[in-house]
Amino acid sequence: MIELSGLRYRTIGINTLTIPPGITSVIGPNGSGKTTLLRLLSGIAEPDDGEIHIEGKSPRVTDVGWVNEFPDKNILFVRASDEIASTLRFHHTPCRETDNAVLAIAESMEITHMLNRSMRELSGGEKVLVALAAALVHRPRLLVLDEWDSHLDEGRCLKIEQLITACQVPYVIRCTQQMETASRGDHLLYLEQGHVVQSGTPACVFDSLVHTPFYPMSWRCSI
Amino acid sequence: MRLYLNTARACHGNWSLTVQGTFCEGIHLVSGDVGSGKSTLALMMAGLLSPTDGSIGQDGISSSMIALQFPELHVTGTTVAEECRSWGLDPESVLGAVDLMDKSDTPPLSLSRGELKRLYLACILSGQYDLLLLDEPFSSLDCREKERLCEILARRSGGIIILFTHEQTSFPRVDHIWEIQGGVLIDCGELPGALVRWEHAPALIKKLISAGRCPKNISPGDLMEAGCRT
C-alpha cells in the first residue's frame, strides 16, 4: 500500500489517503495539484509536513520511474539509446546487461528504430516513448506518469498500457486529461484545489461526476 | 482563401513525409500516429520549415499563426502580465477570461502546464488570423477547458483553422478530416462521409459507426446524439 498522512505542501492538503497496488489514475481541473501530488509521490519534492510511505518506505528510497509530459525537461543524453540506458548505468549495471535490457524494452515498445536517433530530432510523442522506456527499463516498484498520454495516439496508449501491465510494476500512478484512459484504471482520484475530493473505483468516482465534463464520453454514449 | 500543398516533402534520414492537397476555409482536423509528421506538417504550413521538395502555396491568406505543441516554447515574458503585453494585449482582458487574474505577477514557467497552455491559447485566440495552426491544442487542458476551447473555435468565423491532435473525445464540429499514414497525407474528405474513411478515428467513433450509429460530426453533442439514437 501507499499511505499518505497529514500531507502539506504548497496547495496540497491530504489528511489520510491509501492507494492500493494497481493502476491509479489522477484527474482534476488544471491547477488542482495533480502534478504536485505526483512529484511528492515520486520523491522529486518533499512535503513541508506529513508523510508518504510506499510499502513502508519513503519515496526517495523506492525505485521510482518518472515520465514527464514535457520530456525535454528530463532529457540528459543526446542519443535515445543512452537516454534509455541512463537509469541502469547510474545503478552501475554491467554493460552487456544494460544493452540487452535497452534492446528488450525498445523491442517491446516497438521503438528500436529510434535508438540511434538524436533526442532533439524526435517528435513530442516519440520523446515521451523514450522517457517511458527509460522509466520502465529498471522495473521500478512505482511508475509515475504525468499526462504521458496527451501526445500519444490512442492505439499506442493501449499497447503501452498492456506493456506496463506485463512488466508487473506494483504501483502505477498516472495523471491524465483523457477520461477514457482514466476509466480503464483500477482506482481513481479526483482532485480539486489540492484536496482529494473523490477516491475509489472509476465507476464509483465517475458516478459522482456524471453532471460534469469529466464523465467519460463513452459512458455517456452507452458504448 | 486557400492553402495549397504541392507535393511538398520533408525528410530526415529514412523518414519522409509527402503532402498534397488544398485546405479551404473552415476547421480541418489532421490525425496520425506518433512520429508520423503532424508537427512537421504544421511547421511547413506555417512557413517555419522549408520543404525539401515541392512547395506550399497560399491564396488570399494575409496573416497566419501557429500554436506550438509545447507551450514553454511560446514564453517570452518574465511575468504572466508581461507575456500578455508581448502579444499586444491588455492583461486584464485576457487573464480575466481564463481565470488567471491572480497569477498576473507570476513567472509564466511557474504556472501549471494546463494554466500555461490556457494563457498562450488565450493570447493566440485573441487575434484573428486567416490561417490558424493549432498543434495538440487540447493536451494539458482539463475537460472544462477543452469544452471552452471547442466553443471558442466554433464561434470563430472565416479563415482556415487546422487542428493537429491525438484528442479522443473533445472536438469542435469540423469541416474536413485528414490523416497521415505511411508518410503520406490522406484526404478523408468532408464530414460526415469522412468518418467511415478515417483510420485514426477514436475508438468511440469507430464503435458508434460499427453499431450503425454514425455521428453527423464529432463534437460531444454529435457523439451523444449518435449514442442515444435508437
Image: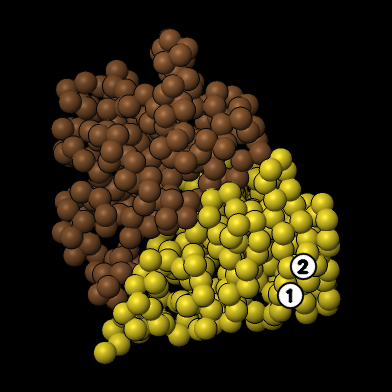
Q: Is label 2 in contact with label 1 (beta carbons under 8 Å)?
A: yes
Decide: is A85 above or below A160: above
Give the camera-side residue of A96 and B70. Answer: A96
**Residue at 42% from the left image edge and 32% from the top image edge:** A105
Tell me the number on the disc at residue B22: 1
Q: Quadrant of residue A126?
A: top right
Label 2 packing within 10 angstroms: few (<14), some (14-19), many (20+): many
Image position of A152 with respect to B88: above or below: above
Residue type at tag 1: Thr
Q: Nearer the viewer, residue A170 or B109?
A: A170
Which color was chain B given?
yellow
Report in which chain the residue with disc 2 lies. B
Chain of the residue where label 1 is placed in the rendered structure: B
Quadrant position of the C terminus of chain B in the picture:
bottom left
Q: Is residue B87 left or right of residue B92?
A: right
Q: How many marks?
A: 2
Tell me the quarter of the picture where residue A97 sits.
Answer: top left
Question: In the visual, does B194 lie left or right of A220?
Answer: right
Task: From the image, tell me which residue sits under label 2.
Answer: B5
Check the image and report above or below for B165 versus B224: above
Chain A's colour is brown
Residue type for callout 2: Leu
